[in-house]
Image (cartoon, helix red, strand yellow):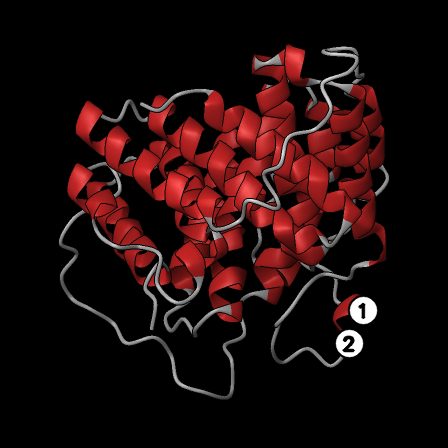
Amino acid sequence: MIDDYYLEAGLITLSRVGEHHWNGGHFGAAVIAAYYFSHEQQLGQAAGAALARQLDRMIAGHNDLFLPHDRAGKGMGDVTSIIAALDDNIVELHAIGHNVIFASLALKALRQRPELATPATIAGLVALVRQFYDHGPGRPFYGWPDILAVRVEPADDVPAYTDEATIALSALAAFSAIENVYPFLHQGIVGHLLTHAHALIELARLGYGELAAKGHDAHRLYVKLSRNQPDEGEPIPKHNNVCSVPLEADYWKRDLEGSRQWLVGHVFKYTYSFYDLVRHVDSESDRQRYQAQLAYVLTEK
């Protein structure tokens, strides 16, 4: 397990990127996700220490994003303004769910550390969520002449989301059904099927069930949009053997930074969401198949 210093570091970054472009929020979200992954999966000391070293390297490479806020008004901010901002855009799919993903992680961290809810932090998080108002479903979704016109139809075989398990199993099935994954942008399309679904689940767990339910159809639309494969470039090569998994120290002892900086933090976020969602899978063969897909999606070409 790792120290809750990382919760504060992640919140700082998420609340600062509203001043710039939401894409920088990936790194703050990654730090919060890694913290919760280590605690909820009860990582051993060696695995937790190795994971923390990866995070420290990532933070050091983005010091400008992790500069602290003024602590004036400590713990005086009101998270209802974040909820209100999210309520305005959760119904539609924006930037493959990042409005929900970032807000959910921030709200979870603030629930655990309410003293971090300074006015500056809350204002920054609201500004971040509001950035998504002007963003469409995201990219690259292939084979749709007019993405904004696409709706989920009964023939699409995307189940209605009635409970946590339904959301988790639908997301994992869609995630694993994508046979060939293409580098970078397509990796995001595939991986965020998990993190968007997980964010909706987490919102409900935090007590915002009605808000989360408003976002169900946006994720169901995401599932439909993700089914078309790219028609250009080369997919990531597949490797038959997974040497270690993120629950083991050896996984985090490798150099995971690569040329894309921990896949812009997705190494941590996909892992966190995956292991929470996969708890709903009873079949061991399915669990192994999903695990193999996670390893594939986290591969850097």
Relative side of 70 to 245, left or right: right
Give the residue type that dot 1 points to: Ala
Relative side of 5 to 114, left or right: left
Q: Quadrant of the N terminus?
A: top left
For the residues labelled 2 and 1, say whether their Cβ atoms are less than 8 Å apart: yes
> Whole-Å distance between the Cαs marked 2 and 1?
6 Å
Task: Specify the label residue 146 is tagged with.
Answer: 2
For mark 1, what is the residue? Answer: 149
* Residue 245 showing in the rendered view: no
* Residue 241 showing in the rendered view: yes
Q: Is residue 40 above or below residue 241?
A: above
Relative to the observer, which residue lies in front, 248 or 28? 28
Q: Residue at x 75, y 67 (%)?
A: 150
Q: Residue at x 62, y 57 (%)?
A: 222
Relative to the observer, which residue lies in front, 130 or 227? 130
Q: Is residue 15 above or below residue 27?
A: above
- In the rendered image, residue 220, in percent from the top left (x then y), is placed at 63, 51
Q: Quadrant of the C terminus?
A: bottom left
Query: Disc 1 on helix, strand or loop?
Result: helix
Q: Which of the 4 image quadrants contains residue 271?
A: top left
